[in-house]
Amino acid sequence: MLSDLELLEIEAEKLGTTADALLAVWDELDPESKEAAEFEGRAAWARKDVSVESFCHFHWVMTRKEASPYAKVTWIPALVKAYHEKTGVILDSFRGSGKSFALGLWVLFVTGHNPKGSSVIVRINDDAADETGGWLAALIEYSPGWKMIFPNVVPDKDMKWSNNGYNVKDVTVPYGEWVEMTKADHLGEPSILPAGVTSSSIIGKHPSNGMYFDDLHNEKNTRSVREMQTVVDIFKSDIIPTWNRIGGHPTLAVACTLWHEKDVYHAMMETGLFVHIQQPIMWLDPDGEYESEAKAYSGEKVSLAWPEEFPMERVVEIENQNPV
């Protein structure tokens, strides 16, 4: 990812000036003008392409916060690679790491860049799917950040805008032409389709922007191998067949915490389509800056995934809350 100085030099070259000259102008601006300029500048970067740099700017404009350090280093590069190469990635991380939020923002990001395409995001049940779909739709409809980055991509309420799916349209394209473009890209699903893993609505769908899975297991459906197998059976019978389409399978991405060797995530890995990326909250590191105060690695040198957000005392707290 480019540094702030490199970004400044690129912008200066576009304007036919120097980085020093831009910095001089910047120093003269009042705080409100600086905030507006950063907002607009980062929005312009966010809409450039589907890249690590663009998504990091998208994340900031949509949230006014930087993505986590591990998201920048591992998650986002993996998602970008999977998107361009039509492969799969499993983001296996600790609870509270922000993986579900990052995956949701990613769905919005690719929708903005390819609004004629479609995405399916699968949750553990319909209630969870409705919740995810609701906040994604709200950001498209109301977020100032979205309107700054993708002002041309708006809700298509004449087509579909509900828990059963959300359609968008590009207002720069005549509507009749737009409908033809979307139907040529995909026939069976809206721009964003949130659905529970047991829902029949995911059967026969071939999303062109990707199929995304967010936490398909919890304490209830992992109490026995039989209950986990129910989810695995649905995955094998109703979901895998949808990955066969002209041009190959879609981009696939999963946000999860592994539960058991018989869970659905292991079944996904058995397909050979996924790269498995693990992000622990802390790990053994002989050169680490911290000494573990948790039961895990007690007294040993460790590194922390995000010390500012998850310091050692919070790691201990999370361990006590989730003893398994």
Image (tube, rainbow, N blue to C red):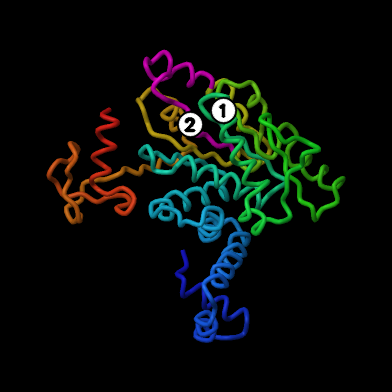
Query: Which of pointers 1 and 2 lies earlier in the amino acid sequence?
Result: 1
- What is the x, y in percent for residue 96? 39, 40
Q: Secondary structure at mark 1?
A: helix
Residue found farthest to the left = 299
Q: Amino acid at mark 1?
A: Ile
Q: Which mark is residue 271?
A: 2
Question: Pointer 1 and pointer 2: residues touching (CB < 8 Å)?
Answer: yes
Q: Which mark is residue 240?
A: 1
Q: Residue at x 76, y 42 (%)?
A: 156
Q: Amino acid at mark 2?
A: Thr
Q: Which mark is residue 143?
A: none
Q: Nearer the viewer, mark 1 or mark 2?
A: 1
Nearer to us in this view, 126 or 106: 126
Q: Residue at x 12, y 44 (%)?
A: 299
- What is the x, y in percent for residue 114? 68, 50
Q: Is residue 289 left or right of residue 281?
A: left
* Mark 1 surroundings within 10 Å by alpha-carbon count, few (fewer than 14), some (14 through 19), many (20 or more): some
Q: Is residue 291 above or below residue 91?
A: below
Nearer to us in this view, 101 or 64: 64
Q: Is residue 228 above or below residue 132?
A: above
Q: Residue at x 51, y 48 (%)?
A: 79
Nearer to us in this view, 146 or 251: 146
Q: Is residue 149 left or right of residue 306?
A: right
Query: Which quarter of the rendered picture does the C terminus lie within?
Result: top left
Q: Image quadrant of residue 245?
A: top right
* Region in magenta: 211-234
- What is the x, y in percent for residue 170? 76, 51
CA distance separating discs 1 and 2: 9 Å
Residue 198 covered by magenta stretch? no
Q: Residue at x 37, y 37 (%)?
A: 95
